[in-house]
Amino acid sequence: MKPIKKDTMSTLKIKLDYIYKYFFWALSRIFVYYYIRRKFNIVMEKSFDKIPKPPFIMVSNHATFFDPWIVGHFSKYPIAIMNNEDAFRSPPVIRWYLKNIGTFPKKKGASDYKAMKTTLKKLNLGYPVLIFPEGQTSWDGETQPVFSGIEKIIKRSGASLVMMNVKGNFLSKPWWADSYRKGKVRVMCKTLHKEQINSMSEQALLSTFTNYIWNNDILDEENRKINFTGENLACGLERFLWICKNCQSVDTLKTSGNTISCTKCDCLWTVDAHCNFTKTNSSTQEHSNLHEWALWHRKMTKTHILKTKDFKILAKNSNVLYCSINKNGKFIPIARGKLSLTKENLSFQAIDIESHSFSIATEDITDYVYQRKDVFECRCGSRNTLRFRIIAHSPMKWVYYFRYLNGYEVYEERGYI
């Protein structure tokens, strides 16, 4: 009997792996259909193109943790999902599931050459790939600027492009929220086939899928007609908002039930499931919705940067935990202290262990993102990844300041990074 050739063994292994992934994916789709699809009341819009056979790349807007399952389950073919690398630091059971479902890691909020190489490899093995071009979930229900480069992968791979637009996902579970809302999630799909893609320039392709996936859940007229309901609708908002629009004080916002209030001026607003605000007395500054308040935060942040002199503090938080993370995804506090930012430096002043204090040049810090609702994370050359748990306040404050210190408004204007 002749020995089996190495190439034959490799091909057989790839086929068996695909078969295993196919059945694992089928089981996951059953779970999605009977739990997630009903939980979020997911419906297909009339303008929903048929999902093609692989290879294809699926892109979608991203506003909630469950988006990979919301859009992915429409494909009967097992999809390789580009996922935030932080998920692979989760407990063993979750890591096992992510591996078997076909996910692969990408740095959050940053370009990742290794992830792009993995994308091409997965396509060559016959797997469709799901990518969320924003790189992270929406802050306020509006699609963020996307990371360019995906259009190059699409052109190079020769794969079809499946564009998904999801509406109602942010309102169903905002990233900062402690509770779910009940409403409706509407999904649209449009497919560009290889011939169409070949006739387009890279810039035209980038513009096409950027425009298609754009969404603003709070301003969407159809969403306003849907009766979204829930409890404790304000709880968690202080993870996002940090400036009181009434008195402009910082880090004084607190939430309880369906209300958000300022501990300094005692103004109070109620929040509904559409993220609309209602003031409770005539002396309180009016807000229309969360998106409007978020735009005002952007304006205030940029103005504060312009008015603040060099070496003066732009932002600060006390009672911050400087953390590391173990292989099981558990955050391990290293030191507690005060985090502060000037135009020149990010500084951490430890309270308990002085040796853990440090200061890093602002220009050396990159890839500033929030993680797990209350963690501000960034990277620098000398210390690799830095993680700070911002207790009872906004990690987004730090993301805003770093972004606008580095000209992020240019990306917001053109829609891509």
Image (cartoon, helix red, strand yellow):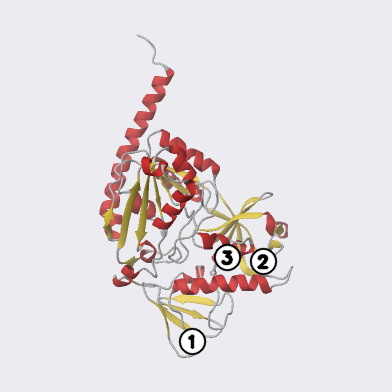
Residue 400 — which label? 3
Three-letter code, disc 2? Ser
Element type at mark 3:
helix
Q: Residue at x 41, y 24 (%)?
A: 10
Residue 16 — which label? none
- Residue found farthest to the bottom: 282
Q: Residue at x 49, y 90 (%)?
A: 283
Question: Which residue is more in the foreground, 295 or 230?
Answer: 295
Q: Position of residue 303 (x, y in %)?
A: 62, 73
Of the 4 image quadrants, the one containing the N terminus is top left
Q: Is residue 256 above or below residue 348?
A: below
- Residue found farthest to the front: 199
CA gap between label 2 and label 1 equals 30 Å
From the viewer's perspective, is 397 left or right of 170? Answer: right
Three-letter code, disc 3? Tyr
Residue 284 makes an appearance in the image: yes
CA gap between label 3 and label 2 equals 14 Å
Mark 1 highlights which residue?
284
Question: Which residue is more in the foreground, 366 or 334?
Answer: 366
Q: Position of residue 408 (x, y in %)?
A: 58, 61
Q: Position of residue 93 (x, y in %)?
A: 41, 46
CA gap between label 3 and label 1 equals 25 Å
- The picture quadrant where one finds residue 399 is bottom right
From the viewer's perspective, is 163 left or right of 394? Answer: left
Mark 2 highlights which residue?
340
Q: Are marks 3 and 1 in contact (CB under 8 Å)?
A: no
Q: Position of residue 228 (x, y in %)?
A: 31, 70
Q: Is residue 277 above or below residue 146?
A: below
- Residue found farthest to the top: 1
